[in-house]
Image (cartoon, coloured by chain):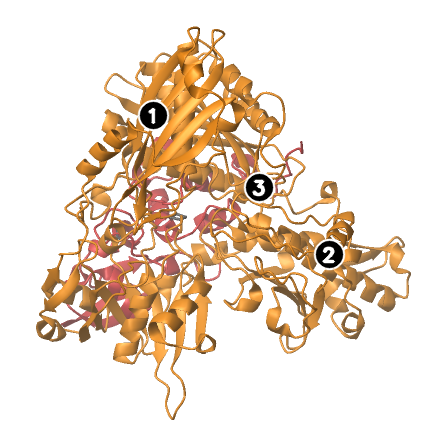
Chain colours: A red, B orange
Amino acid sequence: MASHSLEVNGVVHHVEADQNEPLLWILRDAIGLVGAKYGCGIGQCGACTVQLNGHPVRSCSLPVSAVAGQKITTIEGLSDGDDLHILQKLWVEFDVPQCGYCQAGQLMSAAALLETNPDPSDEEIDAYMAGNFCRCGTYNRIRKAIRTAAEMKNSPAVTVADSGALPLAGVPQERA
Amino acid sequence: MTTRKPSSRLTDTLKGRLQARGIDLTTSTAAGEESLVVSRRGFLRLSGYGGGSLVLGCYLPLSGTPEVNAAPAVDAVELNTFISLAKDGTITIYSPGPEMGQGVKTSLPMIVAEEMCADWSSVRTEAAPVEERFGRQSSGGSTNIWRHFQAMRIVGATTREMLLAAAAERMKLPRTELRAEQGRILHSSGRSIAFAELVGPELERQPVPSPETLTFKDPSTYTLLGTRVGQTDNADIVQGRPLFGIDQQVPGMLYGTFVKCAVLGGKVVSANLEEVRRAPGVKDAFVVRGTGNPSELSDGIAIVGSSTWAVLEARKKLQVQWDESEASRDSWQAFQEQADRVSRETGETPVADSGDVEGAFAHPDHRVADAFYQYGFVSHLCLEPQNCTADYRHGTGGQADSLELWIPSQIPGRARQYAQSLFGLNPEDVTIHQLRMGGGFGRRTSYEYANEAIAMSRQVGAPVKNLWTRTDDIQHDYFRAAGAQRLRAALDAEGRLVAWQNHFVGVSNRGKVVPGSVLQPSEFPMLNLNHARASQTALEIATPCSYWRAPGANVNGFVVQSFLHELSVLAGRDHLEFLLEIMGEPRYLGAPNQWSLHTGRASAVIRLAAERGGWGGTVPDGEGLGLAFHFSHAAYVAELAHVGVDEAGKVKVHKVTAAVDVGPVINLSGAEGQVEGAIIDGISAMMGQKITMEGGRIAQTNLHEYPVLRMPHAPVVEAHFIQSDTAPSGLGEPALPPVAPAICNAIFTVTGKRVRTLPIADAGFAFA
Ligand code: FES
Ligand code: FES
């Protein structure tokens, strides 16, 4: 056991932990931030994704000793106070989640993608997001939300309605 | 899935009276289930719930109980569903169905809100507490929509009527001149009043209308049902709020892990518990004895400690001597050989026998085709592993022991029965919280993870969160049963399908055929033909199998729809035309209710999928189209897959076009999402997913050994709905079964290679 200082969402936490304990369990059990999820524990599903200095990392496979003193952002810190991140807004607008379990990880990866590549192609989105498994199969809506966020960022005149993605206030289809 | 007898005690007069009011009654299901039946108990006002708000409860019989016509009950004990109107305008609607991503916590309250003409933005939805008075609280079999539709409409219409009456009093206007719209009561003069302003004495005073007097909105005037509405939990989900079972934190809570024998049925002989107890952070380690039924509780070692990591690290030190003398010896290799061998004989249980099958096969003008199809075990792989938090409190001073459970379960209330039968608790001393599930797919219908948590909490005297590792979750799953089917069919001289024979080889556990491993006499296309014969054999295995999304349908759809394509190719006929010919004239195959296939609705979705997906059009070289249809869960789904395959067998699914008839769509966004999700789930499973075992030991441990579909392989999915004028039915499962045969039929069109095995990786195919 050793003491570690972690900067999570701008707040410094001092935790006593085995140096090999993965960041995921420190966040969930010690700090009480449960947005990052356990799915596989071996870096294969992406449910535990958080950002380390702005880069997406699998917190289940990152020992606490390796991240001390660095900037960690979790889903709880993605929004700016009450104002949701544009991706969070679009996730709601496009009704992306099904069970929702993977979505914190999806959002943390997607937000990092747009930071490094503000105008990704569909292929670039697919490649970047391939580490985030969604058991419910919400991939198409995730892709559309990311594309729309990029378009809205790059040309402020673009609105959700222009995106071609499904707006929520649709009309019923015809009845037989 | 449980079989219950339809009630015979509902009188015909009552039926007639309610039917005259548009209340649809007693739709018997194939399994003998019954939809909600409205009794004369009706709707009641409740006191003691709202604290200043008006709380209305709806007395509906607990689904499946025989006393639908019993004397009216007047206390709140049998309350099934309720709604609360607060003075600040907030409307809270409780959803009875557990939420696992199928959207029921949104769609059921939408029905109430539509009928009461509420403004959806003022509605909050909540999962109902797990109490008997809320009636049946289970999610499975795509049943929530049809089971609760009528009850939800009654709750909404009753509330609307009472609001109208209260407004008439307040506004001193004739009630007949008032109408409700978007959370307000309006008068033609332009005067109006908000629902919230009516919460008070006038509303309190209004008599509760009896269900027979209610009128329901004409569907053409719906403003909410049929539109796209986002899930009410979305804002919490995208901010990472603690919604799931795994997220629960209780004061003083400890963490537990439970180690079972890797070979199912192994019993603990001894373990180095002293050493494990000395590991950092460990509070206790002890043996728990199982009941012999793995869905209840298996033998194992519980390790409880101060953090998840502490118990997982201690687990690495654990050494157990297991007695495997009565444990599983299952072998995937042996199972396949046995299924192949057995399928060549007639099955032990007859399923169907009509006409003269032998005569049809022997007819000199007929062409006969044979095929052997097989499929493997599949895991559920809910992304949230099984978990449960239990707080077992030892009674003091002569008080009985009590229990509080936080359980992500498809049928949370049933945990109470085990608390009683395994731990001796009084049902009334057990409090259950249902939590959002990180996927269900049929997996969360057993209780071992809850009972392990209870055993741990009872032992250590503190709340314990029991969390399975991913490996526990895969290796101690209840798998989709593997099996095989040997078919034979005859075509007449005109290339028409005239006879059908099938031997279905499935699986039993502990002497009982497992759910979904069964061939029904009504399985398509046997009722469409004059000559059909089928039988079934169950191979007894120890590997536990159970419900997996669209049980039965997920394998039968593949086999039947692939073999039908084989036959249309043999006949030299267009597959679409061949399928439509088998459907024939519009009619029910079986009793005229939603559980029997209606050939007209089937033909309509088949035509629509073909038309929207470009059937008959040209596609580039190396690409092809495949069509399939399947009827399950009262839903009609046809899918057309546009697929590319290269020389090396690399498959790219470009697009799947689905045509769906589940009656009226409740939430279009949810419906589209379920179609898309089920299709992607179906592709994920058919490509490479397979659980294997040797010597009773499951070979797969985690995602690196169990391939899942990821974003680059997700096809475009287009969903089209035919909204037949019937009762609505559920959509969590029925879009899954047609996708595997649609893709395999397309693969044949491109390569000439017939795939008769799932996963198709076993036939040499992989994602491009
Ligand atoms: S839990 Fe970290 S990648 Fe799966
Ligand atoms: S929404 Fe369920 S796992 Fe992605």
Q: Estimate the spatial distance between the alpha carbons at disc 2 and disc 3, rounded to whole Å.
A: 22 Å
Badge 2 amino acid: Ala
Q: Nearer the viewer, mark 2 or mark 1?
A: 2
Mark 2 and mark 1 residues within 8 Å of each other at the beta carbon: no
Q: Nearer the viewer, mark 2 or mark 3?
A: 2
Please provide percent x and percent y for residue B290: 25, 65
Please name the residue that numbered disc 2 is placed on. Answer: B157
**Label 1 CB-ligand 2 distance < 8 A:** no
Q: Estimate the spatial distance between the alpha carbons at disc 2 and disc 1, rounded to whole Å.
A: 49 Å
Q: Chain of mark 3?
A: B
Badge 3 amino acid: Leu
Q: Earlier in the sequence, mark 2 or mark 3?
A: 2
Q: Is the residue marked by circle 2 packed among few (<14), some (14-19), or many (20+) residues within 10 Å?
A: many
Please name the residue that numbered disc 3 is placed on. Answer: B668
Q: Is the residue marked by circle 1 packed among few (<14), some (14-19), or many (20+) residues within 10 Å?
A: many
Q: Which mark is residue B80?
A: none
Please name the residue that numbered disc 1 is placed on. Answer: B652
Q: How many marks?
A: 3
Q: Chain of mark 1?
A: B
Please provide percent x and percent y for residue A131: 28, 43
Residue B100 seen in the figure: yes
Q: Earlier in the sequence, mark 2 or mark 1?
A: 2
Residue at figure coordinates x 39%, y 22% from the top left: B563
